[in-house]
Amino acid sequence: MKINTNLGTEICGVEYGVLKTTKEYYSVLAEAIDRSSNYTVVIGWDFDFDTEYSEGKTFRDLFEKKFQENENYKLYLLIWSGVRLGLSFKKFNAVRKLKNRSNIVYRLATDFPFGGSHHAKVVCVDGELLFTGGMDIVEGREDDRKHLDNKFQDTHWILRGKEIVDFFKNYILKRWGKYLDINEKLKFDKSDRLEVDYGFRVGDFLVSENMFEAYDYSSKDHVKNITLELIEQAKDLIYIQNQYFASEEVRRELKEWKQENPEGDLKIMLPVRSRHWLAKATIDKITYKNMKLLGGDYFYNLFNSKKEPVYIHGKVMIVDDKYLKIGSSNLADRSFGVDSEIDLTLIAKNKEDVEFIRSFREDEWFERDGGCEVVKADVVRKWYYFLPFWLCELFDGRLKSYKI
């Protein structure tokens, strides 16, 4: 069987790579910005100018350098308005401290349903290089494969090529359209090429997204449905890394898959607990319920060499080593219904693609070069699971009256 390409936009011949750590992402992104000529577009849940891309060097330093070198250089920054409501107030205020603020076009995304957020993460440099996946540019997430500093795990795509750029050009212009018409300000067709020190592969992708009704997008269910489609397509193995496991539909589909494929290999890596108190008290409670109902044998946590838990933030799904999905969506109803999200699925077309996905799966799962250890998760009720389920469901965007 083949994957249903109606659950997204199929784009062939994409030059791509997988960035396995935030430090790698920040380093490659900083190189791209430093070599760029015109602009950087950031669409994300959050953004922090004090994030270090190398030791002692921040994105604040990098952009101020770019603004001094080129007075016409622009940073277009669109992040979730929730950062202004206290979740990241320090980072919001950081914008005010920047010099050359005329070079920054800054907007707060507000066009989401009640209880939802702007969660997709896309960075475009000079209309040539694209970055998307689970990573925001946020201080405190700079981490490597050893996970000894911030103990944070994430995964991201780096992309280039005409067709994928054309898709994201349309995405960026639509996403910005409510706040500012930047169509004439962005140059996507340039004669010179932006090069970075990175080895790209070439492959075919399915891009799935959800936006809000204001954009008249018929694809608002694609992020959820591509996840369910991949489970249905699986024959031998399903590997998942995710921040949450709070979707009842995903849990039911996985339960059914295991019943039909008792020898199938199912592994789900989650964080030991959420970082934020509200998520602990709400989504973690739903996650616990789903883990119990599916069965605790399938769940794992990651620990560094000091036996400290690593926070899983990457959103990765691998099926039969034929499909590799990395994106911004969590396995939670809020991602499927009230948050903006974007996921990219690499579709293996030959033995080399299958081998790449298999190698990535083994390397990503075991974190071999970092001395980390994957252990079975303890499925136990935590003391802070005290809120009623209706409130947990409201926070997770599950109540029908609040869905898009």
Image (cartoon, grey):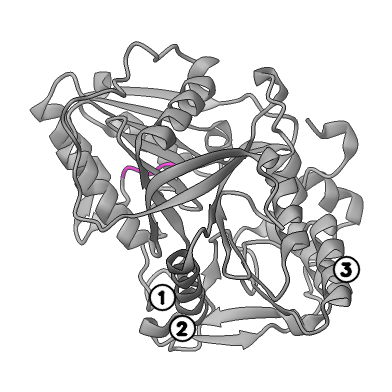
Residue 35, visible in the rendered structure: yes
Confirm or deny contact between disc 3 and disc 1 (CB under 8 A). Answer: no
Task: Name the kind of residue labelled 1 in the image.
Answer: His
Disc 2 and disc 3: Cα gap in Å? 33 Å
**Would you name the residue on which mark 2 appears?**
304
Residue 299: image x %, image y %?
A: 70, 78
Classified by dominant secondary structure, the portion drawn in magenta counts as loop
Q: How far is mark 1 from mark 2, CA to CA?
A: 6 Å
User: Which quadrant does the N terminus fall into?
Assistant: bottom right
Q: Quadrant of the C terminus?
A: top right
Q: Nearer the viewer, mark 3 or mark 1?
A: 3
Q: Nearer the viewer, mark 2 or mark 3?
A: 3
Residues shaded magenta = 45-49
Mark number, residue 256: 3
Sequence-wise, which precedes: disc 2 or disc 3? 3
Is mark 2 in CB contact (under 8 Å) with mark 3? no
| Dot 2 amino acid type | Asn
Residue 42 visible at all: no
Please tell me the numbered disc located at residue 147.
1
Disc 1 is placed on an element classified as: loop
**Residue 263 is drawn in which quadrant?**
bottom right
Badge 3 amino acid: Glu
Q: CA distance from mark 3 to mark 1?
A: 35 Å
